[in-house]
Amino acid sequence: MRRGSILQLVGLGILFGGAATLVAVLIPWLPPVASKQRDRIDFVFWFTTGIAIAVFALVAAVITYSVLKFRVRPDDDSDGPPIHGHTGIEIAWTAVPAILVAAISVVSGVVLVQNDHAGKNHMDVNVTARQFAWTFTYPDDVSSAQLRLPLGRPVKLHFRALDVIHSFWVPEFGQKQDAVPGQDTSLVITPNKLGTYPVICTELCGLGHALMRTSAIVMKPAAFAAWVREQKNAANGPPGDAGKAAFASNGCASCHTLKAAGATGTAGPDLDKLPAYAKQAGKPLEDFVRESIVDPNAYVQPGFPKNLMPSFATLPKTQVDALVAYLAGGPK
Amino acid sequence: MTAAVAQHGHVEAPRAPKTPRDYVLKAGWIRAAWMTCLFWGIGLGLVLIFRAWAGWDPLFDWSVITVVATLTAAPVGFLGGLGAFDYWVRYAAGSPTVPEDHSSHGGRTWSDYFRPNTDHKVIGIQYVVTTIVFFVAGGMMAMIFRAELARPGMQFVDNQTFNGLVSVHAALMIFLFVIPAFAGLGNYVIPLMIGAPDMAFPRLNALSYWLLPIAGFMMLLSFVVPGGAFATGWTSYAPLASDQPLGQVFFNMGVQWAGASSIMTALNFLVTIITMRAPGMTFWRMPLLVWANFTTSLLVVIATPFIAGSQFFVMFDRIMHTNFFDASGGGYALGYQHIFWFYSHPAVYIMMLPGFGIASEVISVMARKPIFGYRLMALSLMAILVLGFSVWAHHMFVAGVAPWLRIPMMVTSMIIAVPTGIKVFSWLATVWEGRIHFNTPMLFALGFVSMFVIGGLSGIYLAAVPIDIHVSDTYFVVAHIHYVLFGGSLFTIFAGIYYWFPKMTGRMFDERLGKLHFWMTFVGFNVTFFPMHWLGTQGMPRRVSDYSPRFGDWNMLISIASFFLGMSIIVFLYNMINSWVRGAPAGANPWRSKTLEWQVSSPPPYFNFDELPQVVGTPYEYGVPDARHAVFNGDRTTQLEEVHT
C-alpha cells in the first residue's frame, strides 16, 4: 500500500471514530446516577463503548475507503488480484478481538461480584410483585407501595411474585431483577443520591404491564426512620387509617383515582364514584366493594376491560375489612 | 449421486379431461376445502367422545376443541386434500405407485405454484413469495403500533390489541419470514450450487413448504378469536402464557407447524448436501452458502425440538392442568425460559448464518476476488454452531438463574464475537483491492456488513452482565435485535433476492429502483432503530403501549422514520412484480459468477443440469487465470486430472 492511501484510510478512521465519539458524548445515554452499583455499571459501559467505537471506526473506514477507491464501472470486466488469504493477518484478527472481549469479561466479572455484595450492615426489604402493583415490606412489618430507602445504606431486596413473572428496575439505580413465582431472587442497591426515581416493571406481565409503575424515594436516614415510625403508628391506629395504609401498600393508587388518598390512576374506575357503581351493579355498597376486591371480574364497570384487575383474595381478612370500611365509608 | 438424471424416462401423467367426480376427489383445492371441514369434524368428534365418555364438564370445552380440531386435525385434512400425502398413502396402502412419476414436478404454468410441487425451484419461489406476504403483514402491524407509540398516552389501540400486535409482529417476522425466507432461498439455490438434480426428498420438501402458510394463517387468525391475539410477546413466557385468552394457543400450535416445517427442510438440506454433491464437489470446494446452510440445518435439527417441547408444556399446563411451569403446583417457572432459549438462542444463528453465506457469495462475485480465508470462513461457521449451544442463559441474566451460571455464559457469549469478527474482517479483506460493482445486491451485502457490526457491538454490551442488568428488557434490546435481524438477516435476504432474481425469473430487475429501495431502507432503518439504543439506556422498557412523556420526541421521530421505512417496501414490491412481468431478459450468468447455479440457463431446466457438472476447483477463483470451478461433460477434454487436487 502506498503511504498516501494509508493516510487516507487513517483519516477516514478518525472521521468515523470522531463521529461515533460525538454520538457517545452529546447524547445523554445514561440517566443520572443514584446508586453505587450504577457508578460501576457506567464504568463497564464506557469501557465497552471505547472498544466499540474503535472497532466501528475501523470497519466503517475500510468499507468506505474500499467503496470509494475500488469501485469500477458496470462494464468493467476485469477481476481483482487473486488473494486467497494471509495466515498472519488471520491469526491477528482472531487474537485481537479475543483479547478485547477477555478484557471486557474481566471488568464485567469484577463489577458483578462487587454489585452483588451487600455487606454486613445492609437492610433487608421484601418486595411482593403482583399484577400490576408492587408492595415493599421493611423490617418491623411496615409496608408501602412506594419504595423508600435511606441514603448510603446498602439494601438487599428480596423478591416474591404472586402470579406471573415481573421485573423490578430503577434506571437511576441501574439494577434490575425478575420476581419469579415460586423462587427467591434478590438484588443489592446502595443509594447515593437523594431524590425520587421511577420503578418500572420490565417483564411483560399482562394487560396492565405498562401501568405497573411506582417510585423509589431516597431519603435522609433520619427522615427514613421518622417515616417508619409514622407508618407503624398508622397501622395500629383507628380503622380509617388502617384502610388508608392498606390502600397505599397494595398499590391501588397505580390504577385508581381516590381523592382522599391522593391517588390519580386512570386505568381502573374512579373510586370516588363507588356509590354510583354499586347502584349500577345493583348491590349494597359494602358488599359491592368487598366483591370487587376479592373477585373483580364479578362486575366490571362498562368502559373498562375484564381481567385487568387481579383478585386480592389473598390479603389478610383484617386488611380487606379495613379497605372495605375505608372505601365504603366514604373516605375522609 | 450419479449421472442418472439425464437418462431418466420422465413419466408425465396423462392430463385427461376432468370429470366432475375428479374435481371433487382428485388432489386439489376443492378436495382440500371439504377435507379440512371433514377433519375438523373428526377432531371435534374425538374431543366430544372422550369428554362424554369421561363425564367431563363442560362437554364443549373450546380451548380443547380449538387445539385438537382447528389447529391440529383441520390442517392435516387440508394437507391431505391438497395431495401432500397421496404418494405415501398409496404406498402405505399397497397400491401401485409410479417410481419415476414426475407429474408433480416443475413450474410450467402459474397453477403449478399453488399445489404441492416436488421441484425445489418451485418450492423455493413458493417459500420466498409466501414469506414476503407474511413480512408485509408483520410490517403493517409494526406501522400500527408505531402510530400508537408516536405519542405517550393511548391513542389508537387498547392494551390488549397493542400487546397482540407486538407479539404477532415478532412471531411472524421470526417464524414466518426470516427463518423460512432463508430456507426458501436455500431451497432454490443449494441443489443447483452442488450440482444436484433436486433435493434428496422432494415430496418431503413439498410438504415442508405447505406447513408454512398453515402456521402463518394460524397466527393471523388469532386476532379474530374471543380475547384477541396472543399477547405475551414472541417469547411467550410461562406462567403468564398458561393463563391467557384463547389466542395464546394459536401461537403455541403455530410454532409447532412452523417448527415441523423447519426441521423437515433442515433434514432435507443435510441429506442433500451430504449425499448429492456433484463429482469432485468436496466439502472444501462447496460455496460458503452451502456451508452456511449445512451448519444452519444442524442447528435446526438439534435445537427446534426444544421450542416445540416448551410450547407443548405450556399447552399441557393450560389444557390438562399439569404443572410444568406453575409454581403453586410444584412447577418450575424459570424452566420455560431455559428450554425456550436453548432453542431461541441458536435460532438467532439460524436466522443469521444463511445470511453470512449469501453475503459471502455476493461480496466475492461483486468484488471480483476470491473469498479471503475461505477455510477459516467455513470453520468459523462451525465454531458459531458449537458455541451457539452454550450461551442461552445470557437472555436470562436478570431472570433469576443460578448466580454461578452468569459468568461462564458471559464468557462463552463473548467468545462468539471471535468467529463473528473473523467473518466480518474476511469480508472486508475480500472487498479490499477488489473491482467493486456497486449494484443492488452488493449494496445490501455491504449494508449488511456495516449494520451487522453495530448489532454485534451492541451484543457485546448485552453479554457483559452488569450492563445487561441495566439494559435488559429495554429498548436497547429492541435496537439490538433489529440491528441483527433487520440490518443483518433482512439485508442479506434482500441481497439474496436481488442476486438470484435473474436466475429465478430469467429477467433483470430495475437497477435504479433497487438502489432507491436500498437507500430508503438504509436511511429509514438507521433513523428508526438507532435512537432506540439510548431510549433503552435512559429508561424506556420494551413492550409497553404507554411511556414517560420525556421520551415523546424521540418516539415521534422513530415513528415517522418507520413509516418511511415501510414505504420502501412498496418500491421493492413494485420492482419485483414489474420486473418479473416485463424485465429485460437476464441471460444465464449476468454477474459472471463461477458457482454452478449460474452455469445453467435462467430459469434452469426442470432437472437443473442437462449435463452433469464435474467440479474441478474451488468456487471463488476470480482473477486466477484459467481457473475453473466445474467442467461439463461437453468439455471434458480440459482439466479432468485436476479432480483429485
Image: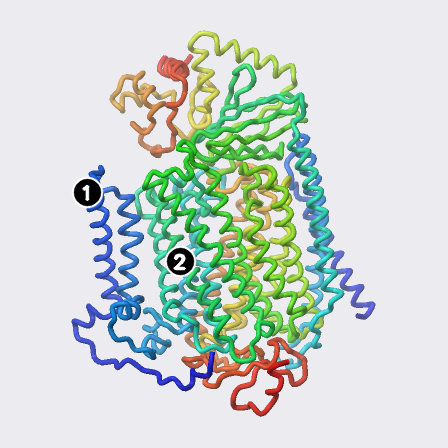
Instruction: Residue B133 in the image: state x and y as whole percent.
Output: 40, 61
Q: What chain does mark 1 sit on?
A: B
The residue tagged with tag 2: helix, strand or loop? helix
Residue A201 % position (x, y): 51, 34
Q: Is residue A100 above or below residue A4?
A: above
* Residue assigned mark 1: B53
- Considering every residue shown, the one lying at the far bottom of the view is B637
Query: In the image, what residue occupies the spot 69% across and 34% down?
Result: A39
Q: Nearer the viewer, residue A117 or B534?
A: A117
Question: Same chain for marks 1 and 2?
Answer: yes
Residue at the image position 49 percent from the left and 62 percent from the top: B297
Query: How far is the residue under mark 1 from the one under mark 2?
Result: 32 Å
> Which residue lies most toward the top here?
A238
Report crowding for label 2: few under 14, some 14 to 19, many 20 or more residues within 10 A (C-alpha).
many
Q: Quadrant of residue B554?
A: top right
Of mark 1 and mark 2, the one earlier in the sequence is 1
- Residue sitting nearer the eye, A197 or B122: B122
Query: What residue lies at 57% left-to-right and 59% top-to-bottom?
Result: B522
> Position of A285 compared to B42: left or right?
right
The quadrant holding residue A239 is top left
Q: How many marks?
A: 2
Under mark 2, the amino acid is Ala
Q: Residue B260 bears which disc, if any?
A: 2
